[in-house]
Amino acid sequence: MAGNTKDEILHDHNHDGIDRRGFLKCMAWAGTGALCVMQGGVLKSYSMSRPSEMNPADATGELSFVQISDSHMGFNKPANPDVAATLQAAVDKINALSRPPEFLLHTGDISHLSKPEEFDTVEHILKSASAKDVFYVPGEHDVLNDDGKQYHERFAKGAQEGGWYSFEKKGVHFVGLVNVMNLKAGGLGTLGHEQLEWLEKDVKHLKSSTPIVVFAHIPLWAVYPEWGWGTEDSAQALAYLKKFGSVTVLNGHIHQIMQKVEGNVTFHTACSTAFPQPKPGEAPSPGPMKVPAEQLRSALGITDVNYVSGQHALAVVDSTLA
Amino acid sequence: MRRSVFLANLLVMAVMGLGGIVAEHSSFVASAQEKAASTAEVKIDNFVFGPAAISVPVGSTVTWINRDDIPHTVVSTEKVFKSKVLDTDEKFSYTFTKAGEYPYFCSIHPKMTGKIVVQ
């Protein structure tokens, strides 16, 4: 998980110890941190664990934001007995970025047991982030006991009744979807008829050159259905986004970084700020994965996203807390 | 005369005897049922209900106990019963008063399913 030093660096163009191939490999482990920015179609990478070496001019675009996920406030088992501290560490990392992100996206499982004090703590910790606006989508842990009423009152006041919503920032269209309600026995995440109809209308009149960012808790592609890591009706949602030249899908839920590119759509899942989970099939169940304490922080992380106007792809980068 | 009285007595004794046997039989059945309608336990661990399917007599109380390090719920697919969220070591019990099949799942992790068969 953390720093596999057996990998060789083949072409060190940026002289920062990471080459393009090495960087993409590291992203798959979720064990290292690097800032990746697309400029004129060329991938440049910088190591976020050495913020003093980051060149601000190179590492920024016209819009940058940070994705965090799965803070599970209230979790206190051996896999991480202090999830508040690791969330604070993620915020410290955000605050150490050379340029403050414009806002944060939280892709759900904010709380662990939907308790008011858990939501309170997360909101309190995030208040100390350099980015003042936070946009949320719920995880299944946020809508326990009350059908999401509390989540809705706190985080989705301006949203549609079901909690989904959209907004624009600097010409990028963001859509927050909810796929953790009304889960059926034996099933996966679900968007439902009403939300899909809303989505179709919401994007219908946008120009196809508008970059789209969709964020939802459970992955919108079939990462590993056996563990419920997928959404049964996401294909319909993606069909409504087919016309767009750049679609980025940001998800959480699986507590590890995974990426998939399908045509114009890049899917990206984030680390949890609380505890890692095993890779698909590599454990009997998808529960919290215990790692040696010194390795915990390198298995958790934040995602930094940069949008450079005129470029089609959004550069999505995950950095670990170590 | 004496013979019919004797026979009548025999009949009465027989009936009483039978009645006695029947009475004993009923109480035997009753106590057998009381013993059988007891309790059963389902352990929740590693995202699995164990055992996944159990059979219990009518009147039994099933107790689910969460031994996993992550919370789970116990929700009947036919909406017959629904637990609150069970954190580690928390329990939920339900007494089944009607025979039938009761499939259920964890509403947080819907891939987790189980069944109680009440006979």
Image (cartoon, rainbow, N blue to C red):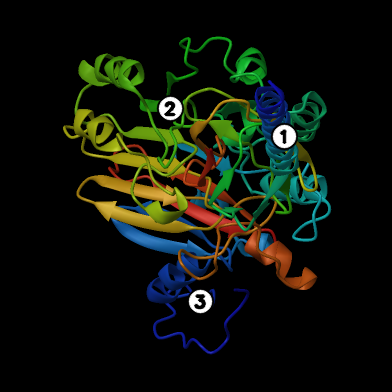
Which of label 1 and label 2 is nearer to you?
1
Q: Examine the rendered structure and indicate whether residue A29 appears above or below residue A317.
A: below
- The residue singled out by tag 2 in the image is A177
Image coordinates of residue A94 in percent, x first then y, are: 67, 45
Q: CA distance from mark 1 to mark 2?
A: 76 Å
The residue carrying pointer 1 sits among few (fewer than 14), some (14 to 19) or many (20 or more) residues within 10 Å by Cα, namely few
Kind of element beneath mark 2: loop
Question: Which quarter of the figure has residue B37?
Answer: top right
A236 or B107: which is nearer to us? B107
B1 or B63: which is nearer to us? B1
Quadrant containing the C terminus of chain A is bottom right
Residue lying at 52% horizontally and 22% vertically, measured from the top left: B79
Q: CA distance from mark 1 to mark 3?
A: 103 Å
Q: Examine the rendered structure and indicate whether residue A14 appears above or below residue A229.
A: below
Kind of element beneath mark 1: helix
Residue lying at 52% horizontally and 37% vertically, measured from the top left: B104
* Dot label at residue B17: 1
**Chain letter for the residue marked with disc 2 in the picture:** A
Asked if labels 3 and 1 touch by Cβ distance under 8 angstroms, the answer is: no
